[in-house]
Image (cartoon, helix red, strand yellow):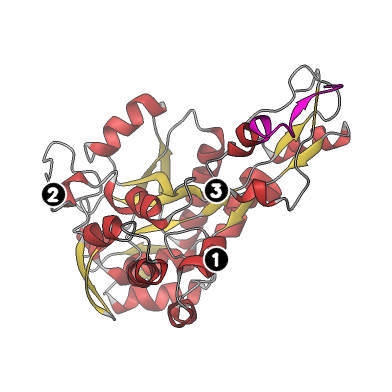
Amino acid sequence: MLDKKIDYVTHAFPPATEQQFSDMGLRIIRFPYYTGPALFFNYAYAPYFSKVEFRQALAYAIDRGQAGTVVLGKSGIGVKKMAGIADNMIPTYVTADVQAKLNPYNLDQKKAEELLTKIGFAKKDGQWFDNTGKKVEFELYVPSDFADWAAAADNISQQLTKFGMKTAVRGPAWSQYTTDMNAGKFQIGMLPWGSSTPHPTFAFQANMINYNAGGKAVAPDKEKPGMNFPLKQKFSGGDVDFEALTFDMAKGFDAAAQNKMISTAVQAYNELLPNIPIFERYSNAPILDNVNVTGWPKDGDPLLANGSADQFITLGIVNGTIKGVGK
């Protein structure tokens, strides 16, 4: 890209590199990926991971916007609605009454401390101890070859350590990482929330199913427990079966019926926080316009909102708008 030999790439560039592209006069294109990194808990590791107050406390304690900005600048957007699906999908799929109930878990470390104290935690000399008197400290597992996720993990570890929960970052390459995460060989790990295929069924598969084989009602795999989160839960709206909702919400063509199920799943997710979404990745790719290729969609073009990451390239080539210069 710096030599202007490539017209477009899909990388996630750090802010300094993005600035360099801008200084060269290249256009930065931004569109939503409907996904990003989240903190996934290994529920077999510590009993208090199963305490909703603990997970909510971490959501209040972490500055999600800071983590996203440090990693991707304007393209690392801190998750606001904490709904298990991308914020900009909520008006389409979530009923108005549930939208009004969603807790944004805005940064509030005093609220985090109140929740931790409620479950018997105590803070002494800046260090948190659990209800048994044991130090609260973790290993945050992250794929080392994902530069953006590794940087986010480093930022989150610094935030949590400053908050009083010493957090170390460790992890192998992605090829080994997924094996370890499936096997439950982690304490807290980073995995994708949501999905770049923008229907909530795929988002909830990522959140609840893909790395949670041990918690599934159908064909549980004891060799791959993953986060080991039971998919039948209780929340303020009653009983919820995340596995059934995840797949049923995609059935049929009745949008109202789908949205009712999606709204139930979203509300339950928002209250229970089985995992903690950190930020949504937006593209920050540079475009080499009108040198070899022309016809790139303008900012705000609906084509860019189709999801599936770089789908607009395929669609633009197929419909003839993205083409070689002079053709």
Report the amino acid beneath label 1.
Lys
Asked if marks 3 and 1 touch (Cβ < 8 Å), the reply is no
Q: Which residues are magenta?
A: 316-327
Q: Residue at x 51, y 38 (%)?
A: 150
Q: Foreground residue, 127 or 88? A: 88
Q: How far is disc 3 from disc 1 in space, using C-alphas?
A: 18 Å
Q: Residue at x 76, y 26 (%)?
A: 323
- The image position of residue 318, as x and y in percent, is 64, 31
Q: Is residue 12 visible?
A: no
- Give the quadrant of the C terminus: top right
Give residue 95's quadrant in the image. Answer: bottom left
In the image: residue 212, left or right of residue 103: left
Q: How far is disc 2 from disc 3 in space, using C-alphas?
A: 37 Å
- The image position of residue 123, as x and y in percent, is 38, 69
Report the amino acid beneath label 2.
Val
**Residue that carries the numbered disc 3 in the rendered image:** 155
Report the amino acid beneath label 3.
Asn
Which is more N-terminal, label 1 or label 3? 1
Q: Which mark is residue 218?
A: 2
Q: Nearer the viewer, mark 2 or mark 3?
A: 2
Up-down: is 7 above or below 301?
Answer: above
Asked if marks 2 and 3 touch (Cβ < 8 Å), the reply is no
**Residue that carries the numbered disc 1 in the rendered image:** 80
Up-down: is 5 above or below 230?
Answer: above
Q: Is residue 85 visible?
A: yes
Q: Residue at x 43, y 60 (%)?
A: 164
The 10 Å Cα crowd at callout 1, few under 14, some 14 to 19, many 20 or more, is some
Q: How far is disc 2 from disc 1 in space, using C-alphas?
A: 32 Å
